[in-house]
Amino acid sequence: MVEPLSEDQADALQEVTNIAMGRAARSLSTLLDTFVTLAVPRVQLVDAANAAEAVQETANLPDTVTAVRQAFFHGLRGEALTLFAPGGGHNVADLLGLDADELGDPPEDEILIETSNILVGAILSGLGEQLETQFSYTPPSIFATNTPMDRVLNPDDLEWTTALLVEVTFTLESRNFTCHVLVLLAENSIAVIRQALDRLLEEF
Amino acid sequence: MTLSVIVADDSTLGRKQVLRALPADWDAEVRQAKNGEETLAALREGADLLFLDLTMPDHTGFDVLQMMGDEGIACPTFVVSADVQPRAMERAKELGAVSFIEKPVNVETLQARLAEHGFR
């Protein structure tokens, strides 16, 4: 049984995420030369059994998504998933001025992996820096293509039973394009996060 | 004369960071607002300076700036935001913000901006 974060801890994690998310948006906005609209990040504790449902409820996702995954380890353990709606890669490719024949095969994957890499890299490094916690991460790879959420987060495949879910949404103003980044911190990292947040809160 | 100041941010930590950065010897009465509605309500009572977050759940800071313009509320506004896209800064300035301070708030930067705009 993992105890939920206190109100102050959840507020601090949300604010720390907000800063990391702002940096990610700056990178994406520079790459695509378009304004990225941000929403307030969401923080909640989820069980493996209801993780898909929890994400579905708050993120307003399409029926199927393509997910890019990066795992992280050492100081903090968990995984980051970037969820794209079908056709998301075409929108990004178009903004980048790329034609299908300039891309790898399948054409969208490369774009989605790169987009995810930029966002997740900025978010994780932003969180690590502010929480003074270092960790390493694996390179991004396509984890699921046009797949329902309950199969993306299939409880049988998850390496944790309870996770702290940090959820961020990026919307491109000039396109019908939204993507979600889920950072799932495995249970044995929640204590580390809690201590890091308490250290931060002590300063104020 | 005592300045009337509003610090608007949905995050408690976000507000605390601004409050801590204000000059200790400053003659100011500070009110806090947790969302767009509270910010507008506080502004309608009158204020000399607003610190405004952009990412808030009900009305964004952009919305608040827009509504201030619509209602003719002329309160100098320092945007304090984690949304550090150049376009976010431009948009905030277009909507009337006088200054843009990046989060996490740096004490020296905030105090220098206050001095720049004659608030101390």
Image (cartoon, coloured by chain):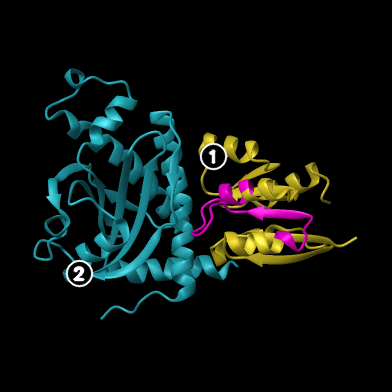
Residue type highlighted by circle 2: Asn
In screen coordinates, is A142 left or right of B117?
A: left
Label 2 chain ID: A
Colour of chain B in the image: yellow
B70 inside magenta stretch? no
In screen coordinates, is A19 left or right of A83?
A: right
Residue placed under numbered mark 1 in the picture: B88
Q: Is residue B26 visible?
A: no
Q: Are marks 2 and 1 on the same chain?
A: no
Picture residue at 39% right of the left edge, 30% below the top: A31
Q: Which mark is residue A114?
A: none
Residue placed under numbered mark 2 in the picture: A50
Q: Percent x, y for residue A29?
A: 43, 34
Label 1 chain ID: B
Q: Is residue A130 visible?
A: yes
User: Magenta region: which residues?
Assistant: B43-66
Q: Nearer the viewer, residue B54 or A17?
A: B54
Q: CA distance from mark 2 to mark 1?
A: 36 Å
Q: Nearer the viewer, residue B28 or A159?
A: B28
B65 inside magenta stretch? yes
CB under 8 Å between callouts 2 and 1?
Answer: no
**Is A174 drawn above or below residue B61 in the view shown?**
above
Rendered image quadrant of residue B69: top right
Task: Say which element carries label 1.
Answer: helix
Q: Percent x, y for residue A100?
A: 19, 22
In screen coordinates, is B102 left or right of B107?
A: left
Residue type highlighted by circle 1: Ala
Q: In the picture, which quadrant includes the N terminus of chain A?
A: bottom left
